[in-house]
Image (tube, rainbow, N blue to C red):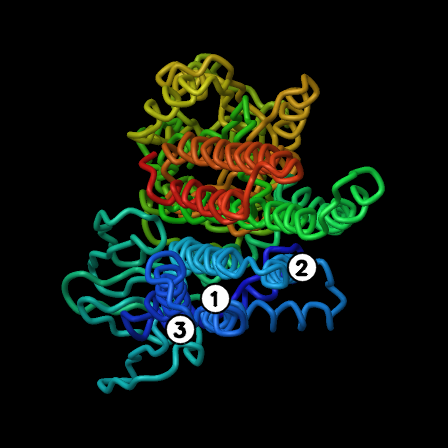
Amino acid sequence: MSKSCCTPDSHQHTHSENHDQHNHSHGNHEGGNFNLFFPALISASILGLALVMDHFIKPDWLVGGYRFVIYFIAYLPVGFPVLKEAFISIQKGDVFSEFFLMSLATIGAFSIGEFPEGVAVMLFYSVGEAFQDMAVTKAQSNIKSLLDQRPDVVTIKEGHQTKTIPAAEAVLGHIIQLKPGEKLALDGELLSEKGTFNTAALTGESKPDTKLKGETVLAGMINMNSVTEVVVTTKFQDSKLSKILDLVQNASSQKAPTELFIRKFAKIYTPIVVALALAIVVVPYFFVDEYLFKDWLYRALIFLVISCPCALVISIPLGYFGGIGAGSRHGILFKGSNYLDSIAEINHVVMDKTGTMTEGVFKVKDVVIDEKFDREKILNDLNFIESKSTHPIATAIHEFVGEVVPNPNFNAIEEISGHGLVGTIDAKIFMVGNFKLLDRYHIQYPENLTQIAETTIVMALDGDFVGYITIADKIKSEAAQTIGQLNHLGVKTTMLSGDKEEVVKSVAENLTILNYFGNLLPEDKVEKVKSILAKKESVAFVGDGVNDAPVIAISDVGIAMGGLGSDAAIETADVVIQDDNPIKIPLAIRIGKETKKIVKQNIALAFGVKAVVLVLGAGGIATMWEAVFADVGVALLAILNAVRIQRMRF
């Protein structure tokens, strides 16, 4: 049976090796769990037989060397791997490992004739380790299931022929043919008129998502109906799913403060316990009249067994790992266990409006252009200048006006962050943007326009007001429920937006958000969040755009909307919501709170039980059987408690 160490430094190394083996065996045959427990089953069978003979049959020959041999045979299947690991750990300079403690305690028990206890301690320890391996493997499987979402090969079209090539060899511009039921291996753009995809791999939601020609489709999506064609727009290693997988694979390296403390604590705690056990044997010799070496050695061995920090060192990382797994199962990616801790303490969520609480899919609603201007020419010029912008509003204008008509007379086009675009056409300055842009250049416009409760794009030509376009954006269906759940959790909410105050006010009032601010530049958002942080509040910022990256970076927890979100926001964020559903914000907080609660329960359980039994053991009241419960029993209870989070409904 493969073992795993519970002491800090060797723990991670040994686990990584063992779990590769476990995952392999689980994946290849159903006997994986049986093989894990097989040595313990052999040991338990021989121990059971020995105990029956010892206490009931009582044959005359079962004394001395024969009795030692039968119990030693029971000990070997579970004891030998631990003795071997103890030897390897000592060679690496890690003397006070859990293997060393267990080896010392059980060899000591054999040396004073307590054979059944010696076997039982090692047997229960081995069973505990097997359960721990199963628990960690299950936690990993929730996360690692993401790794299976991309096929290794793709079918590409070359003329009227198709051929299969490795996915990593596909290049930009290749046309992938997807049959029903096949997964997409690379990000691309849909060439077929329409396609329906299962996006569960990316979002945690199995609801079909219909895409139209020209829309982006992502690696990991499963084609559901007819044969579709997709043109590759991103390299295999640069796809959205590749970035998500990198986040997941690096998550375990970001340790929570509790986890780091326990690892340091165990490093100091274990040698101190060995010294105390030695003192239990030696010190009474000078103070006790009827000193019996065997009795005090037995007490010291009990002390050693109880002292093993397995329950803490295993169950705490497992609790956090379970939290990361539970999050990924719901389409929420935590970049480390430290962010589970941080999000549990959040008391103020600050959010962007567009793309976070609204759909971020804009449609042109009204077009009003002064009669003294040529409507068609103005719209064509507007379409051309907006084609130089990546803002979603530019896409809405393009969809409304149609194909961009090239205009060689346009030059010196400049984007002014937070304001709009300015360009020169036929020696005249053409401006398109928000009201701040016109204010900046002192251009007059009707004051009542600022009262329109929709996003308004205004235009000016050579200092004269030309007209305006209103853009409609829809509030997400889950947005109101999100705010309700955050309020229920006792979390304050604030909405920040670069959009005009009236639009922000309308959305905020619809969602019952009390604090909202509009007309903000990216640097204004940073200042607003800093002012909240200055009040000693724990802040999470939720955003999806490139200009949200600076605010995400300064927050206690930065949350990026990953589906439609920008790569900059996703890379800067601590938590990524894969499907742009705001309801995942309170869900992420609940997962963080439950994880932290479980970790605290395990610390209290381990310290509480061990403290009681340590005192009883040192006083000669507790036996080796109580010691086994205090070590292995508590470890098992803590592990079972830690894996609960993987089955919780949030």
Tell me the number on the disc at residue 19: 1
Q: Is residue 326 above or below residue 420?
A: below
Q: Earlier in the sequence, mark 2 or mark 3?
A: 3
Tell me the number on the disc at residue 97: 2
Crowdedness near tag 2: few (<14), some (14–19) or many (≥20) residues, C-alpha within 10 Å: many
Query: Where does residue 312 sit, x and y in percent of width and height?
Result: 58, 44
Tell me the number on the disc at residue 250: none
Whether the residues at callouts 1 and 2 have beta carbons within 8 Å, the answer is: no
Crowdedness near tag 3: few (<14), some (14–19) or many (≥20) residues, C-alpha within 10 Å: few
Whether residue 382 appears in this view of the structure is: no
The total number of labels drawn is 3
Q: Amino acid at mark 1?
A: His
Residue drawn at x 29%, y 62% is 190
Q: Mark 1, mark 2: which one is toward the viewer? A: 2
Cα distance in 3D space between marks 1 and 2:
19 Å
Of the pair 380 and 180, the residue shown nearer to us: 180
Tell me the number on the disc at residue 24: 3
Query: Where does residue 172 sit, x and y in percent of width and height?
Result: 44, 73
Query: Where does residue 2 sit, x and y in percent of width and height?
Result: 49, 70
Q: Amino acid at mark 3?
A: His
Q: Is residue 183 above or below residue 402?
A: below
